[in-house]
Amino acid sequence: MNMKTLLGTAAGLMVATGAYAADLPGEAAPVAVDYVKVCDAYGKGFFYIPGTDTCLKMSGRVRSRVVYQDGATIDPVTGKDTDSVTFKTDARVQFDARSESDLGTVRSFFGIKLDKGNIVADDAFIQVGYLTVGKMGFNADVFYGDTAAIYGVFDQSSTGIQLMVDDLGGGFYVGAAVQSSDTTVSKWTPTVWVDGRSAELLYSGRIGIKGQSWGAFDVSALYQTFDDQSTGYHDTFAVRATADLKLLDKLSTRITGAYVDYDIDSYASIAGALKYQATDALAVYAGVAGSFWDKSDDTINAQIGADYALSKGLILTAEVNYLTDGGQNLNNKTSYYGNTDDSWSAMLKLTRNW
């Protein structure tokens, strides 16, 4: 028997043996694996849920910070401002699912956050084409850093309905919404109207342009109604304009102006912030804002900070904020910010985004 015949015989025996083993009783056939596939129809981060035509994106953030606050609170015994050092950790996770239908894109969004030791649900809504129903919030951030929204009236979230047309061409969009104002029981099950009370609603509208080489611009307005007999609040009217501009290749700015009328008082605000991307890893920013009341004390807020990317998604932030006496609230007795003297704070924060 020559070498060629020997090799052919061995190969035949191996095939026969493999076929016989595959048919042995009790041996389960291997299950086909449905690998996750990238979905690029809605931007980065989406993938197809296996076995469906729905695209899902999961994103989130965990951040931990230490803050030194000068004049953070008023001691109830001495009546003097006290300094403090605090640690804080918070987190959030968001789920964004989208698919196409005869009615247009169907989107469902849900967010959860951990803050002050409590796990709470954030915004949750269903969007079909131009129509959105569910719990939605305004975007009121002005500065680039960690400072909370300056205009509290624009920083609300409640259940309602929104109509947004965003394909007018040239980046233009227009929209309007109606949401509940009464969130004393729950933002998830707000009371809009009961017998013997006026309906408490938040009407809002917005028009703008986005996706331009120079940046974006929008104007928004809201009118909020209350039943004075049950809540003691007064109707509120507010309008705001915001511009996000690309000044240079690495320099951008955000400018915001607003007017708010609380019926028993009103104020005008203006804020501006700059951000410079010095390197791929380092960005520095600064901002200043002022709110000027008709009957209460004016408020000035200033900020400076820097972000440094230690690695992709891992950012170290150093930030300093300064706030004047905080202004008085509508009854002209106590401050919005807990004190009646100027204060400042310094923060060091580590953030992990994904």
Image: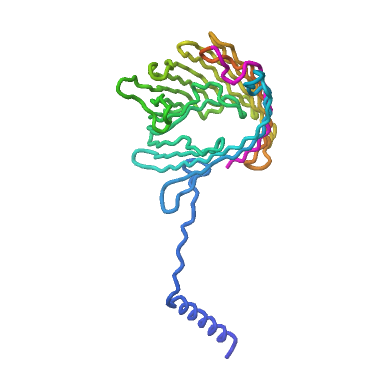
Q: Which one is nearer the viewer's eye here, 221 or 159?
A: 159
The C terminus: image quadrant:
top right
Toward the viewer: 208 or 82?
82
Residue 131 picture location, percent across and down: 37, 32
**Residue 270 on the magenta segment:** no
Q: Is any atom of residue 226 visible in this view?
A: yes
The answer to whether residue 186 is above or below residue 314 is: above
Is 167 displayed left or right of 102 in the figure? right
Residue nearest the viewer, comparing 90 with 239: 90
Q: Is residue 132 in view from this perspective? A: no
Q: What stretch is highlighted in magenta?
A: 332-354
Quadrant that contains the N terminus: bottom right
Determine the image quadrant of residue 327: top right
Q: Where is residue 310 drawn, in percent x and y?
A: 68, 40
- The residue lying at 36 percent from left, 26 percent from top is 192
Magenta stretch encompasses residue 335: yes
The residue located at (60%, 27%) in the rendering is: 147
